[in-house]
Amino acid sequence: MDDFFKGKSKAKKVDTSRANDVASTVPWVEKYRPDSLNKVCSQSETVNVLRESIQSKNLPHLLFYGPPGTGKTSTILALARDMYGPELVKSRILELNASDERGIQVVREKVKNFAKTMVGNNANESHGASLPPYKIIILDEADSMTEDAQAALRRTMETYSKVTRFCLICNYVSRIIEPLASRCAKFRFKPLPKTEMRAKLTQIVDGEKVACTEEAIEALIKTSEGDMRKAITSLQSAYHLSTTGKITDATVRDMTGVIPSTVIDKLMDAIQKDSFGDIQSVVDDLIYDGYSAAQILQQIHSHVIQNPEFSSLQKSKMALVFGTTDFALSEGADEQLQILSMNIPTGANYHFFKEGVKPMWEDSANANGGRWLVEYPRRVEKDINEKWINTMLALIGESYQDSQNICGIVFSNRKTCYRFSMWTRSPDTSQGIKEIGETFLKYLNRDKSNEIESIPFNRHVASRGAKPLFEAKKQ
Ligand SMILES: Nc1ncnc2c1ncn2[C@@H]1O[C@H](COP(=O)(O)OP(=O)(O)O)[C@@H](O)[C@H]1O
Ligand SMILES: [Mg+2]
C-alpha cells in the first residue's frame, strides 16, 4: 500500500517537471516582452510621444536608437499591437532583420509587395476604433545596411509614404545616412535604471516561481549594465544551471564569468606589493580557473577607477595600460602574457632566459658576453607592452639567425625609464652579434612609434660609462 502511494506520487512529480520542461523552452525575453506601450518601462518620454501620435493617428517615420536590450524592438511591437489590436497586428507589420537578405533589390521588392495591398481605414469590429490607413515596416539593426541600400530606401520611403510608416532601429545613429535620418522622428533609448531592472526581474522570478536570492538579482543587474535582455537571458540560464534549484549570487557569478572580488583584491595586493612572483602565481591561478583576460581587465579597471586611493593622474596612466592591453587582447595576443605584462611593477625586472642560464652576469654563459641595450623614457608608456611582446615573440619564434648566441632578454621597469636588453654569449664583433642587434631593433621598432635609430652593445665586464663596443643601426 505504501509503495503504491509512493509510486503514484512519483509519477505525478515526473509529469509536472515535464510540463515545466516544455514551458521552459520559451525564452523568457519573448515570454515577458511588453505587449502594450503601458508595459514598456523607463523610456517614458518616448512612450508618451508615441502614445499621442497613436491618438492623433499621425505617426511619423521613426528612428529608434540606443544600446541593446533597452526596449527598441519591444516598443515598436507594442505600439503596433496597441494600434491594430492583437488579431490584425500580424498582417499590418513587416519586420526585416539584419539576418534577412537586405540588398537594395530585396528591400524594394518586399516593401513594394507589402505596401501594395492597401489598407482601408474601416472600423474593425474586434478592435472597436477605426484603424490608421497605413502599415508599419520595421527595419531592425538598420545600421548594418550598406549606405547604398540606405540611400535606395529614401525613395521607397517617399513613394509609399501614404500607405506605410517605417521604423528604423539601430544601436549607432551615426551609421544612418543623414537624408534617411532626417526623414524620421528620432528617439533615443537609454540603458534601464536599476530600479526598473529590479522590478522586471522580480516580476519574472515571481511569474516563473523561481527561488532566487536578493543578492542574485543585484548581481544580475550589476553585470548587465542596463541591458534588460542580457539580464533576463542570464536569469534563465542561471535557472537552468543551478543544481540546487535555487539561484544565488554565486550561480550568477559562475555563469557570467564574473571573478569574485576576493580574487581581484588578491591580484591588486600582489601588484601593490611590487612582487613579480606573487603576481605571477595569482595570474596563473586566474587563468587556471578559466577566467577570461577581458573580464579580469574589466574588473581591475572598475576596481581602480572607483578607488579613492589613486590620484587622477595615476588613474589616467593605468587607463592607458588597460586600453593597450584590451586592444592587444582583441587582436589575439596571449592572455596570460597580457595580464602579466600589464602588471610589471616599478623597480622590477622581467627576465626571459634560455634554460640553464641564470639572469646574472656571473653565470658562465654570460660572463664573457655583453648586451644590446635600449632605454625608453617613461612617457612612451603606452607602447611598452607591445614592444615587450614583440621582442619576446621574436625570440620564441626563432627569428634570429644566430639564436644560439642569445642568452636571454631582460625588461626593467625603472622610475625614469623602461629598459630592454638582449644578452649574448660572446662579445666579439662578429656578424652574428650585429645581426642580433639589428633584428632586436627591428622588433622594437615594429609598431613604428618612438622609433630608435641605433642601439649600443656593451660588454658585461665594461664599467659603466665606458664606450660601447659597437652599435646596431636601423636597417
Ligand atoms: N524598456 C523596457 N521595458 C520592458 N521590458 C524591456 C525593456 N527593454 C527591454 N526589455 C526586455 O528585454 C527584452 C529585449 O528587449 P528588446 O526590445 O528586444 O531590446 P532592443 O531591441 O532595444 O535590443 C524584451 O523581451 C523585454 O522583455
Ligand atoms: Mg532589437
Image: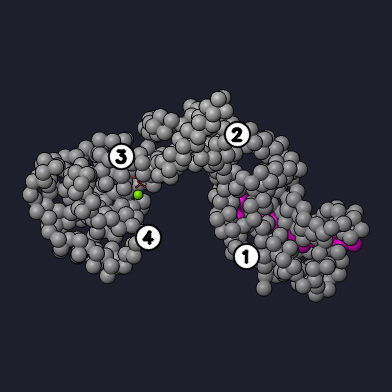
Residue 377 on the magenta segment: yes
Image coloring type: one colour
Q: Is mark 3 within 8 Å of ligand 1?
A: yes
Q: Which residue carries the number 3 mark?
A: 34
Looking at numbered disc 1 in the image, what kind of residue is underneath it?
Arg
* Residue drawn at x 20%, y 46% as measured from the top left: 87
Segment tinted magenta in the rendering: 368-383
Q: Which residue carries the number 1 mark?
A: 446
Which of discs 2 and 3 lies nearer the camera? The answer is: 3
**130 w.r.t. 422: above or below:** above
Looking at numbered disc 3 in the image, what kind of residue is underneath it?
Pro
Which of discs 2 and 4 lies nearer the camera? The answer is: 4
Which is nearer the N-term, disc 2 or disc 3?
3
Which of discs 1 and 4 lies nearer the camera? The answer is: 4
Q: Residues within 10 Å of mark 4 (few under 14, many from 20)?
A: few
Report if the CB atoms under discs 2 and 1 are less than 8 Å apart: no
User: Residue 99 — which label?
Assistant: 4
User: Is 383 in front, or is 404?
Assistant: 404
Mark 2–mark 4 distance (CA, rounded to whole Å)? 39 Å
Mark 2–mark 3 distance (CA, rounded to whole Å)? 35 Å
Quadrant location, ligand no. 1? top left
Q: Is mark 1 within 8 Å of ligand 1?
A: no
Quadrant housing residue 81: top left
* Residue drawn at x 25%, y 35% as measured from the top left: 38
